[in-house]
Amino acid sequence: MRTDYLKLYFIMGSQNFPAGETQALQVLEQALQGGITCFQLREKGDTALTGAASIRFAQKCQVLCHRYQVPFIVNDNIELALQLDADGIHVGQDDAAVSSFKNKFPNKIIGLSVHTLSELELAVQQDVNYVGIGPIFATASKNDAKKPCGVDFITEAKRHCPTMPIVAIGGITLDNAASVLAHGADGLSVISAISAANDPQAATRQFHHL
Ligand SMILES: Cc1ncc(COP(=O)(O)OP(=O)(O)O)c(N)n1
Ligand SMILES: Cc1ncsc1CCOP(=O)(O)O
Ligand SMILES: [Mg+2]
């Protein structure tokens, strides 16, 4: 995987927008125009789209991403990723084990969330393409988020496994992003800093001028 795909990794689902799916697609296009380098569809929670509606929404996101040549990654849902021939899948420690689906995704991007150095070592053994480390700071975008690990953990992780690409996630804003990168992250992953911005395209652009 090209590590530069991780530079500015936008994540969202329809639950992140008061006006749901329509607004989600508008914001995704604005984020793509602003220069996001990767996108993850993360459809979660009580209001999550299901069945045919969720597949149609995912397809619309995928078409937009491909128009801008940005990888389209699916969160958690292995079946959906396979069905859409997504560019990759992201799973966490409580999701399907990487070993259970890795051979179904040849040449695709596989990302894994890690919160400890031992999880990081296992991620290296499983030969994933990148790890998501976080939450770095407090976040309101994930109900079951773990305790923030702080920026120093990024440095520790990079020292421990220098070749594993790291994308930092959780509470990242335009104000703290430079510090996250200075501590060794290869990239930044955000939900609210773009999805809740007054001008998502401008916010996206600003991340490229830290
Ligand atoms: C890039 C990235 N990093 C971490 C996560 C979190 O994944 P997970 O721990 O499985 O939590 P959910 O997103 O499934 O709630 C992520 N999605 N992306
Ligand atoms: C999905 C996820 N995993 C760890 S923190 C988080 C939410 C990040 O959202 P935000 O960028 O709004 O803090
Ligand atoms: Mg998950």
Image: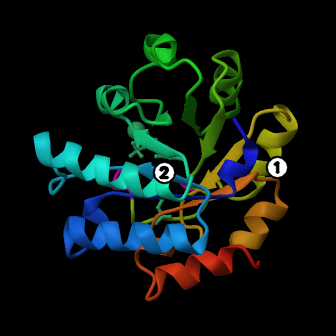
Residue beneath disc 1: 155
Element marked by disc 1: helix
* Residue 158 image point, x, y percent: 82, 41
* Disc sitting over residue 100 in the figure: none
* Residue located 22% across and 43% down the image: 55
* Residue 28 image point, x, y percent: 41, 66
For the C terminus, the quadrant is bottom right
Q: Does residue 174 appear in the picture of this structure? A: no
* Disc sitting over residue 66 in the figure: 2
Above-or-below relation of 141 to 163: below
* Residue 199 image point, x, y percent: 47, 87
Q: Is mark 2 within 8 Å of ligand 1?
A: no
Q: Magenta span covers which residues?
A: 142-148
* Residue 172 image point, x, y percent: 59, 68
Residue 1 belongs to the span the image colors magenta: no
Label 1: few (<14), some (14–19) or many (≥20) C-alpha neighbours in 10 Å: some
Q: Amino acid at mark 2?
A: His
Secondary structure mostly taken by the magenta-highlighted segment of the chain = loop
Element marked by disc 2: helix
